Amino acid sequence: MIKIVVVRNNDEVKKINFYGHANYSSFGNDIVCSAASSILTTSVNAILTFGKDYISYEEKKDNFEIVVNENNDIVDKLLKNMLAMLDELARSYPKNVKIKEEEA
């Protein structure tokens, strides 16, 4: 299961952690993993085109972490869009994707 933890402070996203694997299908054929990866990669790249310092990220073996360095209109809208797409994915595949919200 892909677990996504969204950390907020006063309704602003401050950090997002992605853990695990979807396990919907075999490696290389997993459409849920592919969708989540596409949403993540597209969103991170979009934010970075507007400002290289707006976010930082770190990719480890089974974990991807995004840290928001600057909340602004662009970053907040792109993160809101990313989370909406991930929420739709989680609703379509509840056995494979789970989103949890935390307060910083």
Image (cartoon, rainbow, N blue to C red):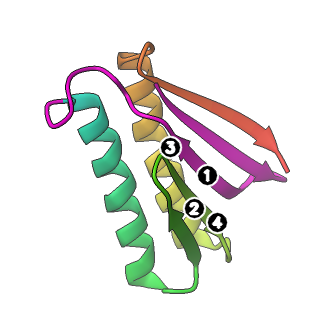
Instruction: For the residues labelled 2 and 4, say whether their Cβ atoms are less than 8 Å apart.
Output: yes
Q: Are marks 3 and 1 in contact (CB under 8 Å)?
A: yes
* Disc 2: CA contacts within 10 A as few (<14), some (14-19) or many (>=20): some
Tell me which residue sits at (43%, 78%) in the image: 48
The residue identified by callout 3 is 83
How far is disc 2 from disc 3 in space, using C-alphas? Answer: 13 Å
Q: Amino acid at mark 4?
A: Val
In the displayed orientation, state which residue is furthest to the front: 61
Q: Looking at the picture, does residue 66 appear above or below residue 52?
A: above
Provide the secondary structure element on which disc 4 rests.
strand
Name which residue type carries label 1: Ile
Q: Contact, CB < 8 Å: mark 1 with mark 4?
A: no
- The residue lying at 85 percent from left, 51 percent from top is 104
Pick whichever of labels 2 and 3 is earlier in the sequence. 2
Badge 1 or badge 4: first in the primary sequence: 1
Do the CB atoms of the residues marked 1 and 2 lie less than 8 Å apart? Answer: yes
On residue 16, the disc is: 1
Q: State left or right for residue 53 relative to residue 88.
A: right
**Residue under label 2:** 66
Residue 2 among those drawn in magenta? yes
* Residue segment shown in magenta: 1-29
Against 5, is 70 above or below? below
Mark 3 or 1 closer to N-term?
1
Q: Is residue 17 left or right of residue 85?
A: right
Q: CA distance from mark 2 to mark 4?
A: 4 Å
